[in-house]
C-alpha cells in the first residue's frame, strides 16, 4: 500500500511570506520528487485563499520516508518555512486504500 503524508500550511498574510513559501515548496517538490521510493511529492496552493498551501507526499511504504528525512535538503526546509507560517503545519499520515479491485457496495 502507498504511504501518504498530507501537510497543510498557512502563510503569514504579507505577500512576501506567501511568495517565499510558494517558491520554497516548488523547490522542495523538485528535490524530493527524486528521492528513492518517492512516488510523488505534490505542492498546491488554494484557489481562493493564496495563504493556504498543501503538500501531498506519496511513498512506496512507510519506511520509504527515511530517504526523504535523510536528504540533506531536509535540514534547510523547516528553518526556512516555519518563520513564514501564521500557524503550525497540520500533518496527517495515511495509507491509501486499494482501489485496484472491484467492490460490492451494499
Image: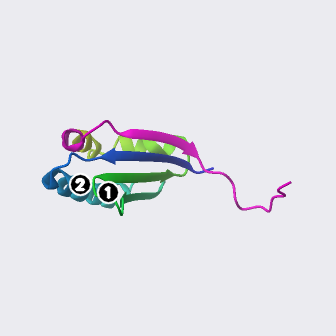
- Asked whether residue 88 is in view, the answer is yes
Q: Which residue is mark 2?
A: 24
Residue 17: mark in rendering: none
| Left or right position of 6 against 9 | right
Element assignment for label 2: helix
Q: Is residue 34 magenta?
A: no
Observer-nearest residue: 65 or 11? 11
Q: Position of residue 63 (x, y in %)?
A: 51, 40
- Marks 1, 2: nearer the viewer: 1
Q: Based on the displayed image, in which of its 4 quarters is residue 33 positioned?
A: bottom left
Residue segment shown in magenta: 79-106
Look at 70% across and 59% down and name the residue there: 99
Q: Position of residue 56 (x, y in %)?
A: 44, 53
Look at 23% across and 54% down and name the residue there: 24
Q: Which residue is mark 1?
A: 49
Observer-nearest residue: 5 or 105? 105
- Asked whether residue 36 is in view, the answer is no
Amino acid at each position: 500500500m502507498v504511504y501518504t503524508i498530507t501537510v497543510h500550511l498557512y502563510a503569514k498574510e504579507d505577500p512576501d511570506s506567501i511568495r517565499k513559501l510558494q517558491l520554497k515548496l516548488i523547490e522542495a517538490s523538485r528535490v524530493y520528487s527524486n528521492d528513492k521510493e518517492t512516488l510523488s511529492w505534490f505542492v498546491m496552493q488554494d484557489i481562493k485563499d493564496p495563504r493556504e498551501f498543501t503538500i501531498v507526499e506519496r511513498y512506496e511504504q512507510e519506511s520509504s520516508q527515511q530517504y526523504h528525512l535523510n536528504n540533506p535538503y531536509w535540514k534547510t526546509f523547516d528553518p526556512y518555512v516555519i518563520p513564514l507560517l501564521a500557524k503550525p503545519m497540520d500533518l496527517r499520515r495515511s495509507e491509501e486504500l486499494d482501489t485496484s479491485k472491484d467492490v460490492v457496495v451494499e
